[in-house]
Amino acid sequence: MSEQVVVVVAGGEPPLPEAVLGMPLGALVIAADRGLEHARALGLEVSVAVGDFDSASPEAVAEAEKAGVRIERHPVEKDATDLELALDAALEQRPERILVLAGDGGRLDHLLSALLLLGSRRYASVQLDAHVGAARVHVVRGERTLEGEPGELVSLLALHGPAKGVETKGLAYPLAGETLEPGSSRGVSNVFAERTAEISVHRGVLLVVLPGGEGEEPK
């Protein structure tokens, strides 16, 4: 049996309360370590908790286990972050979409690795989105239609190699079959011209970030 949507609640800093707005009812929730506590604070019912549990309180873990949450423990000395383990657990459910809820504070290296992880090839079979603090993050392979407000900022970033044949409709600065290189700022600070934008990439993967600010800024 496959799930339509799996929600992964990351550890680290807590997600904003509004991250749950519009979340699909009945979605399976997987928590990454301290994400167990964050999920509870958001009013979410966790089905699976994954990690080494070096940041979640022992009381929270024990309470979750008593409530029937499946606890998947991993050693502290491991080769993957708790978020990566949770995403892998989500992928095992064969969902159509994975939604990650995360905070944007804490360690910079964790934040950077998490954003790079979203574009990993092994998650290419699912639609992957995230709320990271006030920002909304979307992984684009092929083509997607995204919603925003006219004047809302949006940045297109190439991950893990060049994003070739990038085309956009509904943005103030259209791209027409262009190549965005990783490490380039070419796609930063575009702006929604309409309420929807069509973004496609012929080859490669894009991380599309709506940072949560409104209004045009200098490119």
Image (cartoon, rainbow, N blue to C red):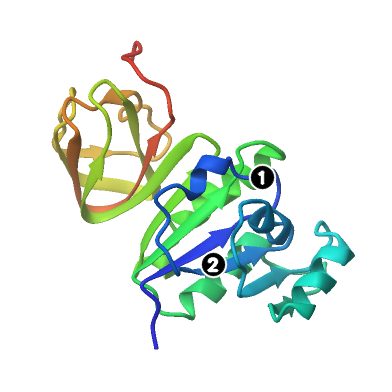
As drawn, the label of residue 154 is none
Picture layout, residue 131 above or below residue 63:
above
**Position of residue 179 measured from the top left corner of the image (x, y, whole percent):** 23, 40
Local SS, label 2: helix
Q: Classify mark 2: residues with Cα within 10 Å, few (<14), some (14-19) or many (20+).
A: many
Residue at the limit of the structure toward the bottom, as seen here = 1
31 or 62: nearer the eye?
Answer: 62
Q: Position of residue 107 (x, y in %)?
A: 71, 40
**Label 1 CA crowd tier, 10 Å (few <14, some 14–19, many 20+):** many
Quick one: which residue is furthest to the top in this view? 218
Secondary structure beneath label 1: loop
Q: Quadrant of residue 67?
A: bottom right
Which of pointers 2 and 1 lies earlier in the amino acid sequence? 1
Q: Residue at x 38, y 31 (%)?
A: 184
Residue at 54 percent across and 51 percent down: it is 101
Q: Residue at x 88, y 66 (%)?
A: 58
Q: Which mark is residue 87?
A: 2
Amino acid found under the numbered disc labelled 1: Pro
Image-based side of 177 in relation to 108, left or right: left
Q: Position of residue 83 (x, y in %)?
A: 62, 60
Q: Which quadrant of the rendered structure holds the N terminus?
A: bottom left
Q: Where does label 1 land, which residue?
A: 14
The structure residue drawn at horizontal position 54% and vertical position 67%, both measured from the top left corner, is: 87
Question: Percent from the top left, x then y, of residue 117?
Answer: 52, 56
Q: How many marks?
A: 2
